[in-house]
Amino acid sequence: LRWEPPPEETRNGLITGYKIRFKKKTDMRSRTVTTDGNRRLYALVNLEKNTQYQVKIAPINVNGTGPYTNKLRATTFRDDLDESVVPTTPRKLRVTSYATSIRVSWTAPEPESKIMVRGYTLGYGKGIADVYMEVLGPDVNVFTIESLEPNAEYVITVRAYNKKGDGPPKYQTAKTSEAEVVEHLTPMMPPVGLKTIVLSSSTVLLTWTDTSLGSSQRNTDNRFYTVRYTPLQGSGRRNRDVNSTGLNCHIDNLKPYTKYEFSVKVIKGRRQSTWSMSVLNTTEEAGPGSAPRDLTTISIEKNPKAVRLNWQPPITPNGQITGYLIFYTTDPNLEDVDWVVEGVLPGERLTTTIKGLTPDTTYYFKMQTRNSKGYGPISPTVIYKTPKSDGTGGGKINPEYPPDFENQFNTDNFPPKDYFPPVQPEGQEPNKADEGKDKVGGLSTNIIIIIIASVVGAVFCVVIIVVAIVFCRRRDYGERGKRPPQGTQSPSKKPGQKDLKPPDLWIHHDPMELKSLNKPDRSDSMLTMSTLRRNSQDSKSIDDNLPPYRPDIDKSNSDVYYCGEDSFPRRSQGMMRSKPSKLSISVDTQGPQREPVAMVTALPNGMSQDNQSQGHPRPGFPRTQYNMQYSSTPRVNAGDMPQPSS
């Protein structure tokens, strides 16, 4: 090291010594060496090869140690170099010419030569080398020659030197360029009247006036404007520029609820103005962009029914926080609308107490921020278990660990040692005996559980199928019991004839119509009328073949009676229905020559004829129309009529 003492006016007395502090670049602590006040040179020994060191020095007098110099950096050589010969020629000499200067760069001689280099000598001259000389240090590899003549050719040399002398030079020629004509450009006037209009939380409209355009304010000379805006809040205070050819500019992608500084300048060719006066404005608010942070639960001493919550505000509130919403429940699977909600006002509060909890119960807490524009995202859920009634237990639960290990509510929230499986060292095979501990009869526990679950599921399915079959059979037996026996089939139906059940389409009509044919207990009989005398043999046979009286048929729906030899009426199984009025068979008191005659008229398919019909004609299936020749309405039995005397 070589140095000079400080100026006398700053010594404040006699210099008694110098304190030298040095260290390696990678070390944190430095070493100190003290020398005499008469020394101007000192050698640091026992240093490491090819290592960079930092060195500084301070003077000492009777009053103490003065200030240290700036740090100097030096790197030791990789090997001890030879200084008995001059260095070799520098390598890669390059020059870059300008109008009044030349930049020169080079690299050190070949390191394989292992020759000491104490520095470099740079010489240059106009047409002749070494007219001017510059002595440079060993670490300098770039130098700029100033104050040269334009459009002139110079010869440049670079050589290395040591104690033995200068080495051979490296030559290079360079010609400076012509002098540039400096054009004195008059600056333009900056725009005035800059105004900002906030359109939304992320968009601002800027307008201004350019006085150099005149009253027309029209851009006809291809000038453009550069708008600069800078956020005044947050860490990203970086200028951003936007170009515009008009007298207004939309700036998008701004941060909500952030103050910005705006300015504008005009540029025309190589001329430009200074920046205009800046304008400040703040974007509108938006909903919170992040959730509250660091939600924590704290137990309250001697109160197992309450818990204190602390949190930090969100990173991006996007506006003035007006409050917080705290959600808590004992069932985390519920929807957010089903959680209990408590509000916290005002927005500056960062703590609250939840009361009315149940002791020894696990609760789930989360919260969200609110401002004038809406609600933000919900924070992560925090799990907390209230203490028991005696105040023991309880505390925060870490969801990363299972809740059934011992001492789960300790402050460390770590599972016991046997919770984690043992780790096998690398290269060591697992013990076969340990692998069989979790197996039963050669099968693992998981496989046995799967087999049992499959068997139970199969048995359950079989039981369901058997129950369904039994239920269907019982219902089938019930329907068969309601059907009439085969012996009650109407005598008018021929053997093998199918029981046709056309739909009853006679609706909304007054005339008499047959009972519905689709009822199982009335579909097997048909009305049979005889035009013979009642005491004839044919009448007896017909009456004998009629179905028996069915007391289960509603009497209110039966209007036709059959008269047998015993003069007792029997009701027909196939009956007729009359909608608004009932049709009765009556007997008048005329002479014995006239017997009651039932007129049977078959109508063609498609229309029904009735003298008393009040409705519209309707289509239908072939029916039998009964026209009774009795005018009286009382209902009597034909066998009970008295015979008039002749």
Image (tube, grey):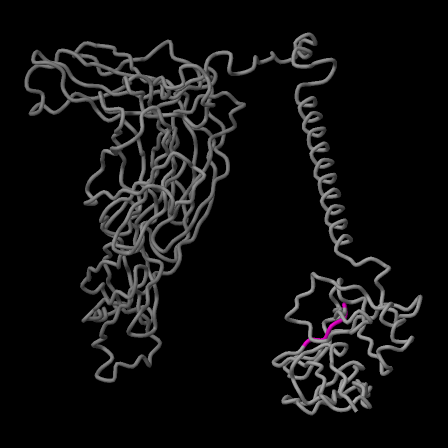
Residue in the image at 23% along x and 55% along y: 259
Query: Is residue 83 visible to us here?
Result: yes
Q: Quadrant of residue 189?
A: bottom left
* Residue toward you, 171 or 380: 380
Q: Quadrant of residue 491?
A: bottom right
Residue 196 as seen in the image, left or right of residue 378: left
Residue 77 as seen in the image, left or right of residue 257: right
* Residue toward you, 418 or 392: 392
Q: State how many labels appear.
A: 0
Query: Is residue 133 visible to us here?
Result: no
> Residue lying farthest front?
645
x and y percent of residue 367 in the render?
Answer: 32, 41
* Residue toward you, 144 or 521: 521
Residue 603 as seen in the image, left or right of residue 84: right
Residue in the image at 39% along x and 31% along y: 120
Residue 372 as seen in the image, left or right of residue 130: left
Give the magenta range: 573-577
Q: Quadrant of residue 451?
A: top right
Relative to 243, is 352 above or below?
Answer: above
x and y percent of residue 539 in the render?
Answer: 87, 75
> Residue lying farthest right?
495
Q: Main secondary structure of the magenta part?
A: loop
Relative to 487, is 393 above or below?
Answer: above
The C terminus lies in quadrant: bottom right
x and y percent of residue 38 in the render?
Answer: 17, 12
The N terminus lies in quadrant: top left
Residue in the image at 65% along x and 9% along y: 434
Q: Is residue 5 magenta?
A: no
x and y percent of residue 388 in the render?
Answer: 31, 20
